């Protein structure tokens, strides 16, 4: 293979490599290279074997992490839904139960808030292999940058796969995600998929095809993969922006009265499935055990300890500029456009300004009164706040149907 080539990997000619190969990482194929590859990887046509071959080839370009934990679990989330940052909560619950959960994430440059950005608002995520091993051995869990741990050949290329918004390239995204779990030697994986308009998995047919692909590719890679679906009709949690989403996470872990209930419930469902998947809970009992670990403070204690072990533990900062947006009439919230909210948060400066973004105050179906706050814009700079206000005028993200 020509390490400097811009020709994308041809998955029809993948040659096996010996385990533990130290072959140098290849340079990024670039976005255009991945697009050319995607043209041959359309979801209705691709097979589990194709995905497994690509994932294996990507994983074989890095040295596996040296830990050996047969019962380790991890989760992968897909859905382009703002919020839904359950991973820190899930890692805390699962590792508090004694189930190892090393979570290595890839940054997502074009997502307003990646899970890695949320964790980075609370603690250090840029851990080299030596530091990562120390944290994992001490805590039984971690949330870290896969690139810094050398668990992915080219984080930018892998993230470019994850950025896709077209169902045809879901297979590429899946291969990239599974390759990281192979490198991390995590044998049991939960893939949570948000289904709905604008999520990348728009309908039942796409969901069923993708679910079968996840399970089938995992089996060919020696992974026990479970796939679950969640509703992707609106954001999960209130904060859209690294620090704002991090506050939601802390509120759930601390049991705050104001914690977003939807984020809490999503996290409990995912954690429950992983507790059963990892053998810590009996079938059908995982969610109940997850509730107990969250409500008795064990998950919070574990998360705080994990953050201190990773270093630079801190409370998320607040943006200096905040501007509420009010309902113009009495009525009911009928639509919350998640993608419009993401664009709004980006206009406010997220994620480059970690404190910037949007806080959502309503949910679909809520009854609201005229002058009631629907959302609040957060920004570091006045010109960014003005840009977000203009973006909201151009593309309202929340539709209130007047009461009759």
Image: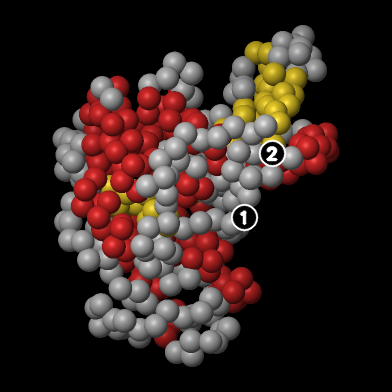
Element type at mark 2: loop
Residue at the image position 75 percent from the left and 18 percent from the top: 327
Instruction: Where is residue 107? Give x, y as percent.
Output: 51, 56
Colour mode of the rendering: secondary structure
Residue at the image position 23 percent from the left and 36 percent from the top: 96
Q: Give the class, few, some or many, for how many residues have Cα within 10 Å of label 1's Cα (few <14, many ≥20).
A: some
Element type at mark 1: loop
Disc nearer the start of the sequence (1/2): 1
Give the spatial CA distance, label 1 vs label 2.
19 Å
Instruction: Where is residue 396? Give x, y as percent.
Output: 77, 33
Task: Please give left or right for residue 321 compared with residue 251 in the image.
Answer: right
Q: Can residue 232 be seen in this view?
A: no
Instruction: Where is residue 329? Give x, y as percent.
Output: 79, 14
Task: Please determine whether, in this image, residue 62 is positioned above or below residue 310.
Answer: below
Query: In the image, which is nearer the foreground, mark 1 or mark 2?
Result: 2
Task: Please determine whether, in this image, residue 314 is positioned above or below residue 362.
Answer: below
The reply to whether the C-beta atoms of the residues labelled 1 and 2 are less than 8 Å apart is no
Residue at the image position 31 percent from the left and 81 percent from the top: 22
* Disc 2: which residue: 380
Task: Please give left or right for residue 372 compared with residue 192 in the image.
Answer: right
Task: Please determine whether, in this image, residue 361 is positioned above or below residue 169.
Answer: above
Q: Nearer the viewer, residue 30 or 319?
A: 319
Q: Nearer the viewer, residue 215 or 37?
A: 37
Q: The N terminus appears in which quarter of the rendering?
A: bottom left
Residue 187's disc is none
Residue 110's disc is 1
Task: Please determine whether, in this image, residue 39 is positioned above or below residue 244.
Answer: below
Residue situated furthest bottom in the rendering: 2
Task: Please give left or right for residue 193 compared with residue 82 in the image.
Answer: left
Q: Hey, which quadrant is residue 63 in on the image?
A: bottom left
Instruction: Where is residue 369? Give x, y as percent.
Output: 72, 10
């Amino acid at each position: 293979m020509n390490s400097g080539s811009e020709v994308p990997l041809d998955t029809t000619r993948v040659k096996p490599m010996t385990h533990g190969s130290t072959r140098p990482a290849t340079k990024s194929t670039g976005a255009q290279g991945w697009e050319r590859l995607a043209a041959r990887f359309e979801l209705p046509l691709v097979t589990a074997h194709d995905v497994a071959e690509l994932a294996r080839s990507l994983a074989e370009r890095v040295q596996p992490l040296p830990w050996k934990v047969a019962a380790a679990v991890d989760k992968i989330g897909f859905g382009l839904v703002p919020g839904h940052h359950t991973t820190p909560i899930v890692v805390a619950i699962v590792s508090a139960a004694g189930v190892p959960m090393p979570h290595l994430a890839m940054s997502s440059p074009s997502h307003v808030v990646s899970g890695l950005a949320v964790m980075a608002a609370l603690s250090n995520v840029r851990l080299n292999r030596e530091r990562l091993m120390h944290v994992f051995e001490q805590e039984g869990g971690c949330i870290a940058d896969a690139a810094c741990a050398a668990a992915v050949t080219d984080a930018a290329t892998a993230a470019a796969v994850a950025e896709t918004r077209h169902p045809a390239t879901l297979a590429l995204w899946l291969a990239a995600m599974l390759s990281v779990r192979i490198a991390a030697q995590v044998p049991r994986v939960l893939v949570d998929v948000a289904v709905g308009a604008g999520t990348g998995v728009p309908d039942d047919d796409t969901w069923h095809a993708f679910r079968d692909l996840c399970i089938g590719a995992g089996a060919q890679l020696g992974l026990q993969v479970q796939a679950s679906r969640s509703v992707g009709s609106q954001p999960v949690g209130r904060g859209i922006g690294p620090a704002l989403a991090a506050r939601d996470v802390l509120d759930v872990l601390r049991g705050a009265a104001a914690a977003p209930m939807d984020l809490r419930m999503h996290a409990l469902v995912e954690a429950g499935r992983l507790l059963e998947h990892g053998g810590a809970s009996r079938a059908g009992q995982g969610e109940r055990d997850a509730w107990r670990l969250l409500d008795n403070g064990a998950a919070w204690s574990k998360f705080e300890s994990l953050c201190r072990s990773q270093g630079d533990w801190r409370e998320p900062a607040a943006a200096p500029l905040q501007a509420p947006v009010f309902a113009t009439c009495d009525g009911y919230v009928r639509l919350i456009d998640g993608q419009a909210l993401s664009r709004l948060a980006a206009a406010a400066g997220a994620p480059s300004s970690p404190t910037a973004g949007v806080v959502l105050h309503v949910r679909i179906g809520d009854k609201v009164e005229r002058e009631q706050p629907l959302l609040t814009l957060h920004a570091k700079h006045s010109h960014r706040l003005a840009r977000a206000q203009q973006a909201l005028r151009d593309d309202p993200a929340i539709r209130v149907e007047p009461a009759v």
